[in-house]
Image (spheres, grey):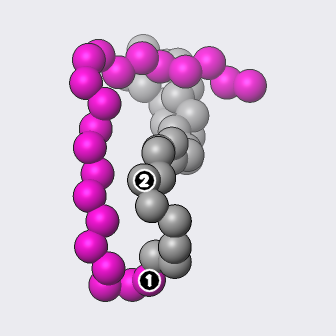
Amino acid sequence: MVRREDDGTITHRAGIMGTVLASGTVEPGMHITVHPPQGPHIRLQRV
């Protein structure tokens, strides 16, 4: 996903990072829990 900011800069927004606590198959309808990281969000550099 690409987005143009109000100041004209382009922001690339994509990807999911996470830590898996248990292995197995995730299927539709299963309950998952998401814990956002604490602290400020820092924009990553494109690689």
Residue located at (30% from left, 65% from top): 32
| Residue 6 location (% of width, % of height) | 38, 22
Instruction: Determine if the magenta segment contains residue 8.
Output: no
Q: Nearer the viewer, residue 8 or 11?
A: 11
Q: Amino acid at mark 1?
A: Glu
| Residue 29 location (% of width, % of height) | 31, 84
**Mark 2–mark 1 contact, CB under 8 Å?**
no
Query: Helix or strand or loop: what does disc 1 sit on?
Result: loop
Q: Is residue 31 above or below residue 46?
A: below
**Boundaries of the magenta span:** 27-47
**Which residue is the site of mark 2?**
21
Q: Is residue 22 above or below residue 28?
A: above
| Residue 2 location (% of width, % of height) | 56, 40
Tally of numbered discs: 2
Kindly identify which numbered label has been placed on residue 17: none
| Residue 18 location (% of width, % of height) | 47, 44
- Estimate the spatial distance between the alpha carbons at disc 2 and disc 1, rounded to whole Å: 16 Å
Most prominent secondary structure in the magenta stretch? loop
Instruction: Indicate the quadrant containing the C terminus: top left, top right, bottom left or bottom right.
Output: top right
Q: Amino acid at mark 2?
A: Leu
Residue located at (26% from left, 17% from top): 39
